[in-house]
Image (cartoon, rainbow, N blue to C red):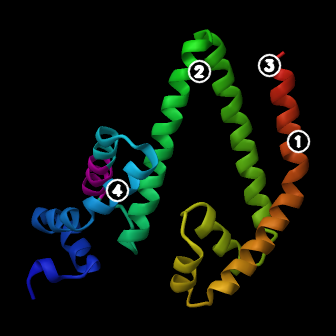
């Protein structure tokens, strides 16, 4: 069997052993889907190409410590993260043109603190759920997997995944409602 016919996992093992040929094969196998996904959201060819190169550069530089179980899922998550980061940078540039620099820094630090508090609160709320329900929520919301991908990964039905997500979201919504209202109130009163 030629290296081009090898599975992703065998290519990944070769990459972890510093095999640049295996890396090139993996790049050739996945660069088009990564590019298309990025370009679908950004509609910017240059930025989409940068995302492809950034993701694969990161894979190569982190090959000894990175844990990848499914390349399609990993690359989709990485691409979405990169797209989100680029959109966030663009929004920050627009905002920075409108606000004084010291006000931006203060708002950024304040938002970072609020975001960290909200994340900690979410983690505590998730711990109240059954383990499988937590796992499904994390795969869906933190690893950006679809219901079908989660069902396949966990060996359960798509309907079970959807039911567990509904339960988890209802639980989170009920428990975070007061926290979100407080954050919105603080954000609004902090701008005055």
Which mark's residue is nearer the viewer, 1 or 2?
2
Pointer 4 or 3: first along the chain: 4
Q: Quadrant of residue 126?
A: bottom right
Please say whether residue 164 is one of the residues in the magenta stretch: no
Q: Is residue 131 visible?
A: no
Q: Residue at x 25, y 72 (%)?
A: 12
Q: Where is residue 163? Give x, y as percent.
A: 75, 80
Quick one: SS at disc 2? helix
* Residue at mark 3 to residue at mark 2: CA–CA distance: 14 Å
Q: Residues within 10 Å of mark 1 (few under 14, many from 20)?
A: few
Assess whether mark 4 and mark 1 are in contact (beta carbons under 8 angstroms): no
Q: Where is residue 188? Give x, y as percent.
A: 84, 26
Q: How many marks?
A: 4
Mark drawn on residue 123: none
Q: Which residues are magenta?
A: 52-62
Q: Residue at x 86, y 46 (%)?
A: 179
Q: Where is residue 80? Give x, y as percent.
A: 47, 53
Residue identified by numbered label 4: 36
Pointer 1 or 2: first along the chain: 2
Q: Would residue 33 appear left or right of 89 to someone viewing this image? A: left
């Amino acid at each position: 069997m030629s290296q081009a016919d090898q599975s992703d996992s065998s290519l990944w093992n070769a990459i972890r052993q510093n095999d640049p040929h295996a890396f090139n094969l993996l790049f050739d196998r996945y660069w088009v889907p990564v590019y298309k996904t990025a370009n679908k959201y950004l509609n910017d060819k240059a930025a989409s190409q940068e995302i492809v190169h950034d993701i694969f550069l990161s894979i190569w530089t982190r090959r000894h410590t990175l844990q990848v179980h499914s390349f399609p899922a990993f690359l989709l998550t990485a691409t979405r993260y990169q797209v989100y980061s680029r959109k966030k940078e663009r929004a920050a540039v627009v905002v920075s043109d409108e606000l004084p620099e010291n006000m931006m820094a203060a708002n950024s630090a304040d938002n970072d603190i609020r975001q960290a508090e909200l994340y900690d609160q979410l983690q505590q709320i998730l711990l109240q759920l059954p383990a499988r329900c937590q796992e499904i929520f994390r795969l869906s919301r933190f690893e950006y997997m679809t219901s079908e991908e989660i069902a396949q990964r966990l060996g359960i039905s798509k309907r079970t995944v959807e039911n567990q997500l509904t339960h988890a979201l209802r639980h989170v919504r009920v428990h975070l409602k007061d926290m979100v209202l407080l954050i919105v109130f603080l954000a609004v009163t902090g701008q005055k």
